[in-house]
Amino acid sequence: MGQAHHPNAPWYINAICTWALSIVIFCGRIRDLFWRRPQTRTGYADLSDQREDFYNRRMYRRIHDCYNRPISSAPGAWIDVMERVDIDGKAMSTQPDLVGGTRRCLNLGSYNYLGFAAADEYCTPRVLDSLADWGVSTCSSRTEAGTSAIHRELEQLVAEYIGQEDAITFGMGFATNAASIPAIAGPGSLVLSDALNHTSIVAGVKASGAKVKVFRHNDMAHLEKLLRWHIAEGQPRTHRPWKKVIIMVEGIYSMEGETTLLRELVALKRRYKAYLYLDEAHSIGCMGASGRGLCEHAGVDPRDVDVLMGTFTKSFGSAGGYIAGSKQLIAYLRRHCPAHLYATSMAPGVAQQIISAIRLMRGEDGSDRGARKIRQLKDNSNYFRRRLQDMGLHVLGDWDSPIMPIMVYHLCYISGISRRCLQRRIAMVVVGFPATALLMSRCRVCISASHTKEDLDYALEVIYDVCSKMGLQYAARQLPWPWCWLRLLLWPPAFGNYRPGDSSSSYEKGSSKSSSSGSSRVWAWLGGGSGKGVMKAHSAAAAAGKAQPLVTAAA
């Protein structure tokens, strides 16, 4: 399947969100006139910027129970989320305290794409054996006493699996970018970076000292314009030719769920003699018929990509990262990359988990379980995406991508969505400013091959119920003026019929009654509707074979 349409925020949502944030900022400034913010020691400079401190105190701390939720189980299809004190909208300077209980939730937040994060009948015994043979840690860097036979085996296997000449591995995914890019680029280099590249790429480019130009996300025309202009101009002041030109992109963008236009990028880099750096942290293992990443998915020869970077923390259920490329490139990184020279090498058990997962995906265990995992992930992802779109939600990302951001837009809604879903036993990540633009808040769903159809249908049922009550079905209807303003100004759906401290049982029992309550009648009268029109359309599509029935028995 091709790339999906990128929806835009309704105009009235942008207006209402701007109005709401203005009120919050105004009230926060008034409060600061009477209650002074915490000060550092006398004579010392502030540790944080005043604007960041204001956002943290007046906005983030009131909803930070929606983030950093601890778990007490392996991140499989279902996880145990540890319950914490209900902050009830109060601004707390520390994380809420644990109360001792747990809540069993469907896991839609972990990057466990192929289901290797939990115990596996093939991988887990081999990991335990490696702990007995190699111990827990090497307690040394790769250049001293930290390189073992298992590390050599892993790097050879990764190079073969990726389709490159050689590979080097690191113990941390973030450091793979942050430490390798400064070794590859430097002063006199030109880096053209996608506007939505990951923070690790941004940190690496900043540390390199290279000149960086940012092109609009997946905009090949803008990228080519920058290439032509800056190659012709040369370096600042001297106008000397650049030492090297590097294009840096991601395979799947973690906040968008979109794939990069790899074929077009390869054509551009050949035309302008630039190097191509591809971050496959989210695409390796889950894209392509055999999980070999975006190159296989797009039909591009891996040797046409100069630097292939990826991590083992997603599809492989482990930790660390790799750089794959020519033998000359990898030999250079082994001599110059600080993450290889000075950091403790990857733990043997972590390396063995990756080796076992790759062998399973290649069918070396004597079964087709690895291939079935990859197919199941694709089927689950496309099924879930199609059903979300049929509900009338704005869903970002491309087909076959396991990352599905559901656009909320309104920053004030994300806490209500997160709390309601948790009460209904759905663990889902919500993302807002500063991780996204101020008016681009979203929920992010990550699909796994370990999810069953019953799991997905239960999640769809809850998401439909929550989103319909909060008026997030932007694609299903367009609200006429002035009812949209009255609905959102006078009766915000994020706060109707809900209190964060309500138990899941009481909420679920009361949800059926709330549709006939006075608040719901006012909500429908003001243009929100009950969602029956969307439900009828969805049922008709199911009857025609285009979608499955929306509501099924809960898992």
Image: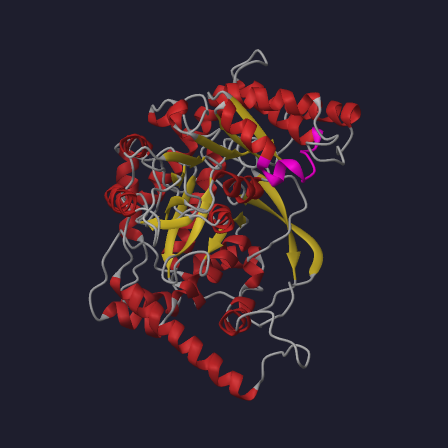
Hey, which quadrant is residue 78 in on the image? top right
* Left or right: 21 in relation to 504: left
Image coordinates for residue 262, horizontal then vertical, percent: 33, 33
Image coordinates for residue 63, horizontal then vertical, percent: 53, 65
* Left or right: 441 in relation to 148: left
Which segment did they paint magenta?
A: 336-348
Hey, which quadrant is residue 47 in on the image? bottom right
Residue nearest the viewer, comparing 212 with 387: 212
Q: How many marks are shown on the rendered structure? A: 0
Up-down relation of residue 408 to residue 265 (above or below): below
Q: Residue furthest left?
A: 480
Up-down relation of residue 104 to residue 168 (above or below): below
Residue nearest the viewer, comparing 518 with 531: 531
Residue nearest the viewer, comparing 101 with 401: 401
Question: Which color scheme did the rendering employ for the protein?
Answer: secondary structure
Hey, which quadrant is residue 153 in on the image? top right
Image coordinates for residue 122, horizontal then vertical, percent: 64, 21
Instruction: Tell me if residue 346 is in the magenta stretch.
Output: yes
Q: Residue drawn at (38%, 69%), measured in percent from left and top?
A: 492
Q: Residue drawn at (68%, 22%), measured in percent from left and top?
A: 150
Residue nearest the viewer, comparing 87 with 438: 438
Q: Residue furthest bottom?
A: 34
Image coordinates for residue 138, horizontal then vertical, percent: 75, 32
Is residue 81 visible in the rendered structure shown here?
yes
Is residue 502 visible in the rendered structure shown here?
no
Q: Residue furthest top?
A: 366
Instruction: Tell me if residue 331 is in the magenta stretch.
Output: no
Up-down relation of residue 86 to residue 283 (above or below): below
* Left or right: 174 in relation to 163: right
Q: Residue drawn at (58%, 72%), measured in percent from left and top?
A: 91
